[in-house]
Amino acid sequence: MALKFNRNLAGTLFSAVVIASFFLYASAALGGGKGGLLGGWSRITDTKDSKVVEIGKFAVDQYNEESKSEYKSKLVFKRVVKGETQVVAGTNYRLVISATDGGRRSRSGNKYLAEVWDKPWENFRNLTSFKKIIKSV
């Protein structure tokens, strides 16, 4: 018994493979399950990563520089508590940072929410937001 080649079935299968390939490629390009959709926020799994710590220190240093005052003591970076990244035209970092008031001897730092936009290929880094996190009772 000879099998007969069915052009309609072959064309349909080819089309299905092309469409499936397109969706797999699009899924990978948009994060492929690692970060969700392009432009979405992804959790930082290693807050001790040198790049993450560098961004956290930059945020505190920049905040200190922008809020210079003879009556205000500088913040001292302690660590990055948690964070997220967002791929845009560069990378946005949203970090919860622990920092102490340089003028006080407190061991426990306050927490701050910092957002930094980083474009390393342009040597561009900008602190876009820095706020103290107020603990609710």
Image: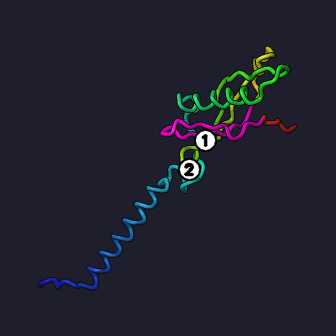
Q: Mark 1 near mark 2, Cβ–Cβ under 8 Å?
A: yes
Q: Is residue 33 magenta?
A: no
Q: Identify the residue at image location x=36%, y=65%.
A: 21
The percent position of residue 56, horizontal first and vertical second, equals 63, 30
Kindly identify which residue carries mark 2: 88
Horizontal side of 52 relative to 67 (left or right) equals: left
Quadrant of the snapshot with the N terminus: bottom left
Secondary element at tag 2: strand
Q: Identify the residue at image location x=19%, y=83%.
A: 5
Horizontal side of 9 relative to 69 (left or right) equals: left
Q: Earlier in the sequence, mark 1 or mark 2?
A: 2
Disc 2 residue crowd, few under 14, some 14–19, many 20+, Cα 10 Å: few
Q: Residue furthest left?
A: 1
**Over which residues does the magenta segment extend?**
111-131
Kindly identify which residue carries mark 1: 117
The percent position of residue 27, horizontal first and vertical second, equals 46, 59
Above or below, 16 against 58 in this view is below
Q: How is the image coloured?
A: rainbow
Label 1 amino acid? Trp
Secondary element at tag 1: strand
| Label 1, label 2: how far apart the Cα atoms are | 9 Å
* Nearer-the-camera pick, 123 or 21: 123
* Nearer-the-camera pick, 133 or 3: 133
Above or below, 108 against 89 in this view is above
Horizontal side of 112 relative to 50 (left or right) equals: right
Label 2 amino acid? Val
